[in-house]
Image (tube, rainbow, N blue to C red):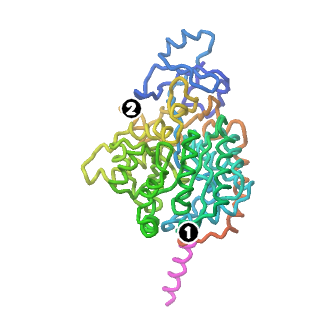
Amino acid sequence: MSIASSNTSLRFPECLTHGTLLLLPEEVMLAEGCLHGQAVLIDDGVFQAVDDAEALCRRYPDLDPIELPGQLLMPGMIDTHHHLTQSLGKSLVFGEPSEIFKRIWIPLETSLDEEMVHLSAKLAAFEALRGGFTTVVDAGTRSPADTTAIAQAAEETGLRCVLGMICNNRGGTANVSDADMDAAILQRGERHLARWENHPLVRPSLAVSIPEVASDTMLHSASHLCWEAGTIFQTHVNEHLQAVERSLVAQRQRPLEHLYTVGALGPQALVAHATLVTPDELNLLRDTDTAVAFNPVASAWKGNAVAPALQMAALGIRFGLGTDATRSDGFRLMDAAETSQRLAFGMTTGDASCGEGWRWLDHATRGGADAAGLAGLSGEIKPGCAADFLLVNIDVPEMTPSWDRPWELVRYANRDQIDAVFTNGRLRLWQGWPVEWDGRALLRQAREAAKAVEEAPIYRVHPTAAELLSRRSGRHITAGQK
């Protein structure tokens, strides 16, 4: 059985919906690189075998091999930092100055009820899958709605989700909190960790938005609960200069140093951004085995500093790539990661490679799974791992002829080349659209529901493009009349 890559838009491949699949793609991305002549056996939602195509077909003569000419079978990418309930806001933050969470995201998210949380999360999950992300790490919502609505969206779309529950217990910089409130938050956190412990797609996590909105005790306790549960503790750290300076005034320590002092760092910790880090703080990350979510597009769009990802790699600091809810295209994210390192560091040192193409592929997949607490479960094409993978059309002009597939994927590929997205061995999207639910109906719902966003107490500094054009037009006319 064969699926021709050049005409796949004309028909839907029913053969890919079977429970057991013996796939023979043009190339398979393994730890050794992108290899020809390999076959992959999938059953019960797991990669059962990866081997020479002829050998694997001989071992399973009763299975009908599915030939996939022109297709690369690669691991699904891992978004190590997302905000699934921000999707209804999207471009509202474009052109905005630093700390947009205060003026836009907090007002928006706190205005969402359970229905809107579900709709926003499902829309974001759809975008993520379209962009080649089979897993996202959600940093937690500020909506008062139950996180079950987010988990439901993940279940309905087939997205693997590390689901954060926010444990903030203070709003200012004074290190005070209410003991009863703290106990209630931690009890809720324990229930959250237990509730999703064995879910096939959802992995629980606890989070603190930024260190200054939690007491020392809460930071330590939430992180420790995650360590005991074998999952990750999340927080944003050293992203904005203002936050670093507030921490220095309140704690006489930078945020990352403060997390270390209270015992919140460790192999269970995943810190987002870490753009403003000193050499000593890099050593803290290395020595505690804390992971980082490197968000290059967020740095560019917000105008923040760029995290020194290459230096992190050289020090052995674990990190994955994250979108921070900016643009859900895994290939463009890898391109942004390499480009940011080249512009911020490589050009000043004469580093022509900036990590090579393979480094960014690795941190978008296997390295991202490790940072997300999913090492050995996802991010790799190997026996025993969940069958979370993509079929990518490489029979395109941009990749012909091919001399270095990893570099080509980082610099040339985009989400339009993704023909199929699988999680747990199940086909979720075909050529960008869901196969088991109505994606266009969801878009209609989102357009209608977006009216509610206008009622949220959002404060934007930068006008929209239409407003700018109107103002400029008005100024021009006035000047001409004068």
Q: Up-down: is 290 above or below 29? A: below
* Percent coordinates x, y for residue 351 in the rendering: 27, 46
Name of the residue lying farthest toward the right: 115
Q: Secondary structure at mark 2?
A: loop
Q: Is residue 297 magenta?
A: no
Residue located at (35% from left, 46% from top): 310
Residue that carries the numbered disc 1 in the rendered image = 172
Q: Give the magenta range.
A: 463-482
Amino acid type at mark 2? Ser
Q: Would you say 389 lies left or right of 267 here? A: right
Of 83 and 452, the residue lying toward us: 83
* Percent coordinates x, y for residue 192 in the rendering: 67, 46
* Percent coordinates x, y for residue 311 in the rendering: 33, 47
Which label sits in the foreground, 1 or 2? 1
Name of the residue lying farthest toward the front: 179
Secondary structure predominantly adopted by residues drawn in magenta: helix
Residue that carries the numbered disc 2 in the rendered image = 402
Q: Is residue 471 magenta?
A: yes
1 or 2: tag closer to the N-terminus: 1
